[in-house]
Image (spheres, rainbow, N blue to C red):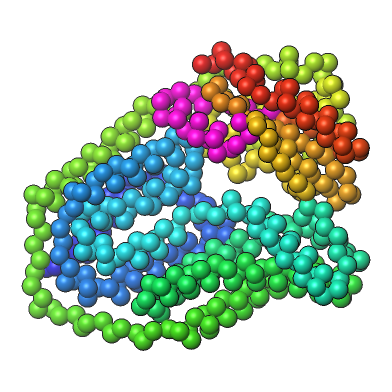
Amino acid sequence: MLTNNIFRLLCLSLVVWGAAFYSSIESTVAIWNRSETFAHCFIILPICIYLIRENWSKLRSAKIEPNLMVLPAVVAVLILWLFGNLAQLLVIEQGAAFLMLPMIIWTLMGNQVSKILIFTMFFWMFSVPVGEFLIPQLQDLTADITVWSLQMTGVPVYREGLYLAVPNGLFEVAVACSGIRYLIASFTLGSLFAYLNYQSNKKRLIFILFSLALPLLANGIRAYGIVMIAYLSDMKYATGVDHLVYGWLFFGLVIFVMFAVGSIWSDPVVKMEKEDNELPTSTIPKVKFLSVLIALVLLVGSTFVYKNLVNNPNSDFVVDVDSLFIDSQDMNDESWLPIFENANAEMKGHSEGLDYFVAYYKVNVQGQELINSNNKMFNVKKWSIEEKQDYAQFKTLTIINIQGRKRLLAYTYVTPWLTSASSIKIKLSQAFEALSGRPQLGMLVMLSVPVKQEQQDTQKLLDAATSKLNDGLQDFLDESK
């Protein structure tokens, strides 16, 4: 029967996908499990099953027609997955892996079924844990809204980076205050609400944009409220556990307001046609289906064969940068030092009036990467960014700690093929090295100076950075080519 065919093909697609991309799925679920930001991802599959059930009447009457024309798009997604896997770009690998399930369904079941399931396929992509790269920008936005709100209500406030000082207390806009959890959860729920409650795509888009804007504004107001409660209570309230409780209660109120506003313009519910057990049985073109299935298996199989052939070759090359930093001594203050996890070698010290730090990686495997979100340019528990500046081949950061001491950092990344302060460029460079089967070694080189006389110290660091943080650094890795 047609119903059985639909059910069997959906199950087949899920099994094929799960077997082929098990490692990517496992790493994704591990993130769901350890990160509260993405805990909601556990309910995405049950919601997708519900959405399929809601469209069951339409699916039962749809024509199943395997689509060979989708195979070039499948190849593109497989290349994207291979690119992400070899280069340890986890978000690309996971995104491509989860995109493959809709692609498999589209290929095996054709255009009619895919059109009916188009929102379900879109919603399925909320399973991918992405968005944490927005945290620094969200922290700045939260601080901006908080400072503006405090000034509008007559509360004296002084801002240094992410530190906000009011007359009776000091606050930091930490990662937990960025609102990233609210934003992702609101976007997910808002998209689902828009699909279920509106028939017009225009209304759906407007509500989805509203679900993105509202938590950004609300989080700024929440942060302002926390500061005001602490300020008016002389720091007795909204500074500890009640801070977090207040935040989640406020978020619940925001979601309630969002749904309440959205319900005002809800469209009438469209009644689904009753299931008719007497519908004619649909036949699947067996030759075409087997051809498409075999093509899918061959494409996925060849992708994994190539991956195993070129997967992350190791390098025994040992970097030596002693000639770059002469008469090196121990540095006086190490509280600012970058945190680069599992580097194969780290070098730090004081030379020519500047502190320096080098982190070298001779491989690029999961948990041991030059470019990784867990690697920090400074100790984020003790310092925060006040200002950043881009230059031709390096970047500078001005950081400040809670005591008001400032420090200026200049850094760049180096691979055998490229010197750049852009993490994206370096990661792409390593990705292309990975695709060609070359070792993905590289290093971070950083110079630093405490800021006492701002203009003089800044010029001193810029002169040193211009002299040292350039293409000449690739000479230290030349022998590895």
- On the question of residue 463 being in view, the answer is yes
**Which one is in front, 401 or 302?**
401
How many numbered callouts?
0
Residue ID at (34%, 45%): 77
Q: Position of residue 67 (x, y in %)?
A: 18, 52
Segment tinted magenta in the rendering? 420-445
**Which one is in front, 92 or 266?**
266
Residue ID at (11%, 68%): 1
Q: Position of residue 328 (x, y in %)?
A: 82, 19
Q: Quadrant of residue 331?
A: top right
Q: Position of residue 42 (x, y in %)?
A: 46, 62
Residue 358 falls left or right of residue 261: right
**Which one is in front, 133 or 207?**
207
Q: Position of residue 372 (x, y in %)?
A: 59, 40
Residue ID at (47%, 72%): 206
Residue 249 falls left or right of residue 151: left
- On the question of residue 368 being in view, the answer is no
Q: Quadrant of residue 329?
A: top right
Q: Quadrant of residue 56?
A: bottom left
Q: Examine the structure image and report whether residue 438 is included in the region drawn in magenta.
A: yes
Q: Examine the structure image and report whether residue 48 is included in the region drawn in magenta.
A: no
**Which one is in front, 111 or 303?**
111
Q: Is residue 96 above or below residue 364?
A: below
Residue ID at (80%, 73%): 152
